[in-house]
Every structure is written in structure tokens, then in C-alpha cells.
Amino acid sequence: MTSQSQGIQQLLQAEKRAKDKLEEAKKRKGKRLKQAKEEATAEIDHYRLQREKEFRNKETNVMGSQGNLSAKIEEQTTEAIRNLTSSYHRNMEGMMKKLLSTIFDISPEIHPNFRPEV
């Protein structure tokens, strides 16, 4: 009976060691997953920063600086306004004469479809 009791004790101890090893493996796995996640996050952040930097460089090369672009737009707008104003002053008097002559110079005519009563 003692040998049977000894065998049961050994099985219980082996089972306990197996549980301990399993728990330890689970803890290591959890730590490793956490570490892998942190490494992946750091790598993603690094990659994102690198791509954003490349994008900004390309954007600057293609579009120029934003201040320069707004200055060009302002200059073009001022030039267009100046052209429109000068065109208005050049053509205003002539257009007024045409409008007034169209309104006041009326030549009455009988409409071609008019039939006098017989």
C-alpha cells in the first residue's frame, strides 16, 4: 500500500510540476506577445513618420511653399482686377452711347403681318 501511495504522490507532484510549467509558459507567451506588439507599434510609428516626411518633401517640390503660392494668387487677382477696371473705363462711354442710341433712336415701321381693314 505504501508503494501505491508513493506512486500516487509522485503522480500528483508530476501533475503539479506540469501545471507550473504550463502557467510559466503562458506567462512567457503573454510577455512575448506584449513585447511583439510594442515592437510592431514602434516600427509602424517609425514607418509612418518616414512616409510623412517623404510626402512633405514631394509636396514642397511639386507645389512650392504655401506662402509663395498665396502671394502668386494675390498678384494674379490684383492684375485681373486692374485689367477689368481699365477695360471698364475704356469701353464705358462707347457702350453708354450704343445703349442710349438703341433706346432713343426708334424708327416706327408697320409690322409685315399687319392687315389693314378693308
Image (tube, helix red, strand yellow):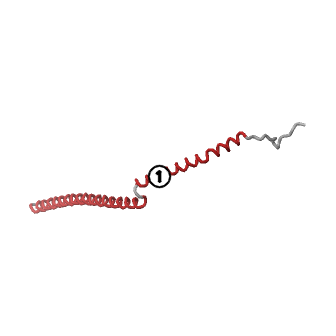
Q: Residue at x 70, y 40 (%)?
A: 103
Image coordinates for residue 69, horizontal then vertical, percent: 43, 54
- Disc 1 is placed on an element classified as helix
The residue singled out by tag 1 in the image is: 75
In depth, the one of 110 and 9 nearer the eye is 110
- Up the image or down, 49 lies above or below 84; here it is below
Toward the viewer: 99 or 42?
A: 99
Quadrant where the image shows the C terminus: top right
Query: Badge 1 local density, few (<14 within 10 Å), some, or many (20+)?
Result: few
Return the residue nearer the eye: 107 or 47.
Answer: 107
Image quadrant where one finds the N terminus: bottom left
Instruction: Answer with the quarter of the image where residue 95 lies.
Output: top right
- Left or right relative to 61: residue 112: right
Residue at image location 18% in from the left, 61% down from the top:
21
1 relative position to 101: left or right:
left
Disc 1 residue type?
Answer: Glu
Q: Is residue 60 left or right of residue 14?
A: right
- From the top left corner, tell me how far across and down residue 71 is, in percent: 43, 52
Q: Quadrant of residue 45?
A: bottom left
Q: Residue furthest top?
A: 117
- Camera-nearest residue between 39 and 29: 39
